Amino acid sequence: MKTLVIDASPQTPKIHFDAITGVMEIRGRSIPDQADEFWLPILNWFEGYLLHPLANTVVKIDLEYFNISSSKRILFLLYKLNELSEAGKEVHVEWYYRQSDEDMYEVGQDYAYMVKVPFVFKEYIDPDIAIAI
């Protein structure tokens, strides 16, 4: 299975899903005009991964903002992680959020509550703030 790489744009996140390492990364912002057009290839790739998953899968999510249509697709992807867990695979989500973005932390908490896989929350300092200090 080929690695899925989609470069970031002003409206879509960078996607790097690697079936060889089991690490799936989503970084940036997700406000596509056509959410299905953007997310469908990603979700289809992940469905293919579920056919032959690795023993360990990590999903890293670092989003500065996403709209409701993206939120639904992200939640669908997270629900799919339940299937891996139920099949005896090790899986967890690393949810990255900026120290100054309490809303994104709370969204991650909401997602963690809705799915059965463990979340690890990773706070980091805004680069702009670090420069100003």
Image: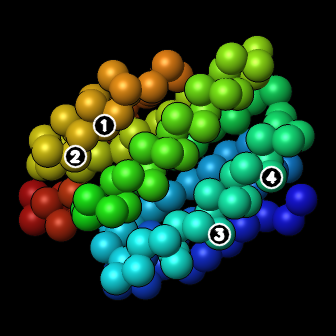
Above or below, comparing residue 6 to residue 26 in the picture: below
Q: In whole angstroms, how far apart are the C-alphas of marks 4 and 3?
A: 11 Å
Question: Are the residues at dot 2 and dot 1 in contact (C-beta closer than 8 Å)?
Answer: yes
Instruction: Tell me, yes or no, if residue 17 can be seen here.
Output: no
Disc nearer the start of the sequence (4/2)? 4
Three-letter code for the amino acid on which mark 4 is drawn: Gly
- What residue sits right under mark 2 in the picture? 104
Residue drawn at x 36%, y 68% as measured from the top left: 30
Q: Residues within 10 Å of mark 1 (few under 14, many from 20)?
A: many
- What residue sits right under mark 4 in the picture? 48
Is label 3 or label 1 in front?
3
Compare residues 126 and 78 and report the one nearer the observer: 78
Three-letter code for the amino acid on which mark 3 is drawn: Pro
Is label 3 or label 2 in front?
3
Residue 32 lies, in percent from the top left, at 37, 78
Q: Which secondary structure lies at badge 1?
A: helix
Q: Residues within 10 Å of mark 2 (few under 14, many from 20)?
A: many
Residue 71 lies, in percent from the top left, at 34, 53
Q: Which secondary structure lies at badge 3?
A: helix
- What residue sits right under mark 1 in the picture? 108
Residue drawn at x 63%, y 50% as measured from the top left: 24
Three-letter code for the amino acid on which mark 1 is drawn: Gly
Three-letter code for the amino acid on which mark 2 is drawn: Met
- What residue sits right under mark 3 in the picture? 41
